[in-house]
Amino acid sequence: MAPYIKNKTEISEMFNETNIFQSYLDVEAALARAQAKQEIIPTMAAEIISEKAKLELLNTERIYEGLDKTGHPLVPLIWELDRVCGEEAGGYIHWGATTQNITQTGKLLLIRKCHNIFLKDLGNLLHILGNLAAETKDYAMPGRTHGQHAVPATFGYKVAVWIDELMRHVDRLKDSEDRVFVAMLGGGAGTMASVGMEGLETQRLIGEELGFGSMSMPSRVIGDHLTEYIMILAMLAATASKMSREIYTMMKQEFGEVEEPIPIGAVGSSTMPQKRNPHLCQDVVAWAAEVRTFVPMSLEAMQTEHEADKTTSIMINSAIDRTCILVAQITNGLIEVFSDLKVFPERMRQNLDLSGGLILSERIMLELGQKMGRQKAHDAVYEAAQRSVNEKRPFTETLQEEPEVAKHLTKEEILGLLDPEQYTGLSAYFAEEFAIKAEQKSKELLGR
């Protein structure tokens, strides 16, 4: 179930053969223009190569015939570009480069397009979450640790936690740009033997043409930058999964605190008509799990032998393509979930009362601790709390029966301290602060 994924088609088609071929042509054209600036090849030749380096101008049947004949991913494309450029320019194509220089840089062109989409999606998501945090900053609910009631919190606080984590992923993605998006021109073994010292400037100019940086070492066995990018996306996916799992859990009837968008007419089960299943959240969790499987593969892909190894190139290409496709689905899935998330503050408030005031044990203990010391207060409240549970009696009663408690607190004072909405700490503050930060980051990412 994924019709709600707005960028699914755009990203999934990003790595189709047409786009891959065009990315290679774009790099070949950038190489020609860079070398023309250095007077390595004639300016006229670079102009013709740039003009003709468009897949729609090439005979794709010839390219596919060449692919079948040679089994080489790039040479048939160069042959066809050579043919359409003619004798005066064709001979200057691919000057001093090797296949991986073109294919790796071309792949990074496509990844950067995905990267820009991810940042835009995260900008939209942060805007949505910022509004949600502000709206729900005072929605008191049980804070839970180890699956059990801990102390009261608010839903806005929970959203603020997600915002904080997502903003760090944005920073990681932005910080990685200079390392990840780099042009490569090292020649056959990465030694620049075919281009010499001027090849360093050529590589820099290729990067400039493409809006990239330049590899400090143009070795064909360096892939840590691609692995880093996959790992950042995997961390983003893990956060997305955590958020989705939380909504999935809170949506259970036993909690009833939120509900993901369920379109009118959606069917949850072929046999159980009442079902309102968290389709979106389950999808995000599954996609995120798949993303994480590519982390070990990308680490393996760094184990490249000698000066080049096709095996690891295949591995990293497979990992990066699929990871980008999945992350686009994940970000859009989250946007869909939180754009129309149903929040039920009344049920949250009811759930706060499930333990009969036990969730305020810490507050009682700290109040008593000011009068009798923290450890004695802890012991007294502990006894009252355990008796309340074991004897199935109201916490207010067992508290009043503890001599050390009754000595320092009246019944009215106890009841006042057991108001959960008065013990949410800085939940509302965090929600407000991160609502503002989310909107600021959103504006940065969306250019608003």
Image (cartoon, grey):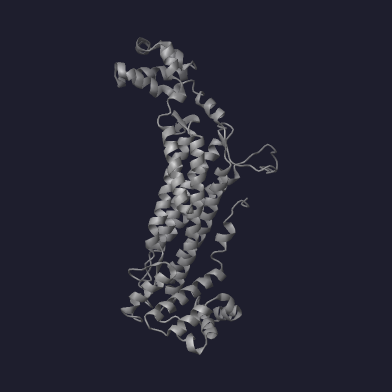
Name the residue furthest left: 373
Which residue is drawn at the image coordinates 43% and 83% (left, top)? Answer: 43
Q: Position of residue 361 (x, y in %)?
A: 41, 22
Q: Position of residue 328 (x, y in %)?
A: 53, 55
Q: Quick one: 77 or 295, which is closer to the camera?
A: 77
Q: Quick one: 352 or 68, which is closer to the camera?
A: 352
Q: Is residue 148 visible?
A: no
Q: Quick one: 441 or 280, which is closer to the camera?
A: 441
Q: Quick one: 371 or 126, which is closer to the camera?
A: 126
Residue 256 occupies quadrant: top right
Q: Check the image and report above or below for 93 versus 285.
A: below
Q: Position of residue 336 (x, y in %)?
A: 57, 47
Residue 416 occupies quadrant: top left
Which residue is drawn at the image coordinates 40% and 32% (left, top)? Answer: 426
Position of 445 with respect to 347 (left or right) is: left
Which residue is drawn at the image coordinates 48% and 81% (left, top)? Answer: 47
Which residue is drawn at the image coordinates 39% and 24% (left, top)? Answer: 362
Looking at the rendered structure, the number of numbered marks drawn on it comes to: 0
Position of 282 with respect to 115 (left or right) is: right
Position of 191 with respect to 115 (left or right) is: left
Q: Is residue 320 visible?
A: yes
Q: Position of residue 342 (x, y in %)?
A: 58, 37
Q: Check the image and report above or below for 120 versus 362.
A: below
Position of 115 with respect to 223 (left or right) is: right
Name the residue furthest bottom: 87
